[in-house]
Image (tube, rainbow, N blue to C red):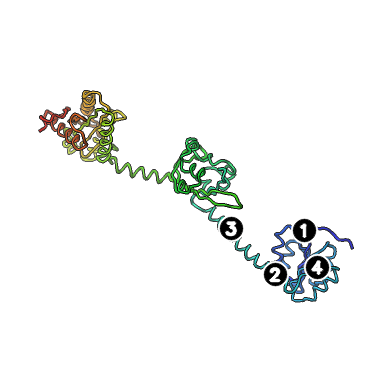
Amino acid sequence: MATSRTRGQPVLILGAGRGGTAMLEMFLDDELVRVVGIADKDPDAPAFALAREYGIPVHLDPEEALRACRKFERCIVYNLTHDDSLTAIAHQVLGYPAATAGPEAKLIWQMVTNLKRVKTELESSQRQLKAIFDHAMDGIITIDESGAIQGFNPAAESIFGYTQAEVLRKPLDLLLPATHQADRTAPLQRFLARHDPADARAAQLLAVRKGGDAFPIELSVSEMALEGRRYFIGIARDITERKQTEERIERMAHHDFLTGLANRALFRDRLEQSIAQAARQGTRLAVLFLDLDGFKNVNDAIGHEAGDTLLCDVAARLRRIVRAADSVARIGGDEFTFILGNLRERTDAERVARKIVQAIAEPFEISGKFWSVGASIGIATYPDDAQDYESLVKAADAAMYQSKRSGKSTYTFFDSGACK
């Protein structure tokens, strides 16, 4: 009888119970094996339904199945029944020792069952890992040792605006601004170069979305080995909102809530830095202390809400007068202070003070009416009048009261004799 060659090794399974089912399931996934039939005397044997689904012939008569197997070259028979006589029958029908039975078949059945269990557990683990990868809120990016992107989860797609297909096998530089790409001292670049986890553990850096917008991220990178190759796993988190919140908190801590000007704490910090810089460079700076004239009367007349509006309008005028390099602060009530740096002469501070007095003297329109206030200003200079924060502010404050005593709406330089 002519025999036919088939794709994969021909296999006949005798027994369609649990063992036969497990073996059939394993062989269905193996391209090296082709199941050419399965036999069992029980028409309701569990493996029959699976065999029919895949077009595999089923037999209720094992001898009939053995005869059908003769048309395949060197068909292997697995006897998973309890009838050891089928092994001898297989030898007789096929003409060669083709059947595995008894303890050998039992061992094979146990091996197949264990393999099926391990496969099921592995598939379950893979599904869990994929679910974690797909549903993680943070972006997960897999990078090979050349810096090419090998994995990009849905969260990363949402963060960066690229689909996985658009970034796979592309260089990681695609997600970084040009300045960061060239900066070999950046945490991520140091990590890729030296593979030191300390270089890229929760590092904060700028990233770039698909549209070109830069935004801050927190990135943690770890290394792993897979099949002899090294990969890096990057966990990226968009921290735009966190940064904005931090900036708001920082601003609230250092700026006046009403006018947006620097508050007393920020003014002190800036003045101390300005003094240190002036000392290093041998330059002069001035501190101006301003108190509004007549503000209480206007505030009482128009109410506190309108008074707040007046203070905001005053702050706006002051901003327009001082240079970008100078500072203006509201340190409380209707008191404002200034730092004027890099002065060549005392007259430089005098010109600014004159402009402030003139600007504040212009009436303010509030709720359809015009209201007038004035500005009394005291001026103290470093290093002429004082050399530290406390002394400079105290001297400027004393000079301001001298302006009040001189008729208000004017400016006065500190004079240790006159201000006693």
Looking at the image, which residue is at 60% across and 61% down? 122
Which of 159 and 317 lies nearest the eye of the viewer?
159
**Dot 3: element:** helix
Q: CA distance from mark 3 to mark 2?
A: 25 Å
Residue type (three-letter) at the residue carrying disc 1: Gly
Please say if 78 is above or below 139. Answer: below
Q: Position of residue 348 (x, y in %)?
A: 23, 24
| Side of 365 relative to 24 (left or right) | left
Q: Tell me the CA gap for discs 4 and 2.
A: 17 Å
> x, y (%) of residue 404?
13, 31
Query: Residue 293: x, y in percent?
Result: 17, 32
Q: Give the residue pinned by disc 2.
A: 109
Query: Is the C terminus in the top left, top right, bottom left or bottom right quadrant?
Result: top left
Near mark 4 (Cα within 10 A), the count class, few <14, some 14-19 or many ≥20, is many
* Residue denoted by label 4: 98
The mark nearer the N terminus, 3 or 1, is 1
Between circles 4 and 1, the one closer to the viewer is 4
Tag 4: residue type?
Answer: Ala
Q: Marks 2 and 1, Cα distance to the nearest angstrom? A: 21 Å
Residue topped by disc 3: 126
The image quarter in which residue 81 lies: bottom right
Is there a contact, CB below 8 Å, between mark 4 and mark 1?
A: no
Residue designated by label 1: 8
